[in-house]
Image: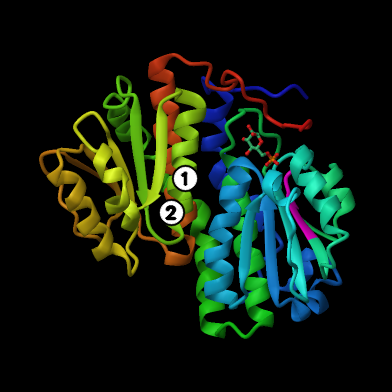
Amino acid sequence: GVASKGEYRHFMQKEIFEQPAVIAVALEGRLGERTVPAECFGPDAEALFARVKQVHIVACGTSYHAGLVARYWLERYAGIPVQVEVASEYRYRTVVVPEDTLFVTLSQSGETADTLAALRFSREQGYLGSLAICNVPGSSLVRESDLTLMTQAGPEIGVASTKAFTTQLTALMLLTLAMGRVKGLAAETQAEVVAALRALPQLVSRVLKLDGAIEALSTAFAEKHHALFLGRGAHFPIALEGALKLKEISYIHAEAYPAGELKHGPLALVDSEMPVISVAPNDELLDKLKSNLQEVKARGGELFVFADEQVEIMEEEGVRVLLLPHVHEALAPILYTVPLQLLSYHVAVLKGTDVDQPRNLAKSVTVE
Ligand code: G6P
């Protein structure tokens, strides 16, 4: 039937709030007791995964950011070297494909022209095979790939992608665990992350309860022209995605940097007119991130930190802290996406932009 916003003001808002439910659907029937069986990727997946020595991931826009997260995950948990590239670049260059490389595309629509062209181009490059992680059943990308995993997020109407991204990440963690199992990831780690995945919808629900607090923060952005997003490790792509969301729907210029690069340029931009948003989960890079944040504060920058409730980061003059529930570090990128979506949403609403249909953008770019 015709999509309806129900109680929500915008489709984007509805889709943000659907995330606990659709993440649960994306996991349905795919988790073993303590492992992720390769069969969710098709009957031939187990044999194929056993042969894979490298992975090349190609995508556009938000889907590309999901690919960047997957690189951290696949290298860390499955020990597989990964390259990630935007489709419009990949398809027009000379690509060196090592033996036994799996080609992976990520796409909400399955119809993005550049991604589809990249898949067709890849066929002549001697890959082991292709896998599409996609949200639209029967789309061109799905029809033309050897293996597929559907994200099952349901139709996404808002041009700025939200639930499609978090379900892509969920699917990519399934891929990481399925490949990890084949590549000898410790059974205990597999079981831990599987248990954490089961608890994820519940945690995302808890993060959504921050909506009011994030709406209150958004007033600090409405008059600003620039914003800087910082993250480290697998949260650097989450910072990129946070910046993309803000650009797309609020038209505020935003950049993202891995926090350790601050001193190599962006620090020169920091002043009281440049809000700095940081994701600070409780991982081994936290102390380094904290000292990066001091560098921002020392220059009069206004800081907004999304942090783990178990972390000691104090609110003080110029530093606002919002605490998220503790989560297994493997899944933190999924959880920390959500407050950044809410922030962009509320800033856009304050600015009165067309949230679901931002100017100059299309939901699916089917021509080059
Ligand atoms: C467009 C949309 C983005 C999306 C990108 C890739 O630019 O506005 O939200 O991330 O296309 O789309 P895909 O359907 O391939 O994920």
Evaluate if marks 2 and 1 touch, with contact meaning CB atoms under 8 Å apart.
yes
Residue at x-position 46% and y-position 49%: 238
Q: Main secondary structure of the magenta part?
A: strand
Determine if residue 79 is in view. yes
Residue 237 lies in the magenta-colored region? no
Quadrant in which residue 280 is drawn:
bottom left
Mark 2 residue element: helix
Q: Amino acid at mark 2?
A: Phe
Which residue is identified by label 1? Answer: 240
Cβ of mark 2 under 8 Å from ligand 1: the answer is: no
Left or right of residue 234, residue 268 in this image: left
- Give percent across and percent down for residue 318: 15, 38
Q: Which residues are magenta?
A: 131-135
* Vertical side of 191 occupied by 274: above or below: above
Which residue is identified by label 2? Answer: 236
- Give percent across and percent down for residue 269: 27, 37
Q: Quadrant for ligand 1? A: top right
Quadrant in which residue 130 is drawn:
bottom right
Residue count near mark 2 (Cα–Cα under 10 Å), binned few <14, some 14–19, many ≥20 = many
Q: Amino acid at mark 1?
A: Leu
Residue at x-position 88% and y-position 51%: 144
| Label 2, label 1: how far apart the Cα atoms are | 6 Å
Residue at x-position 27% and y-position 35%: 275
Residue at x-position 52% and y-position 73%: 76
Determine if residue 36 is in view. no
Q: Which image quarter holds the N terminus?
A: top right
Q: Residue furthest top?
A: 352
Towards the viewer: 61 or 122: 122
* Vertical side of 169 occupied by 283: above or below: below
* Vertical side of 224 occupied by 244: above or below: below
In the drawing, what numbered circle is on residue 35?
Answer: none
Left or right of residue 11, residue 285 in this image: left
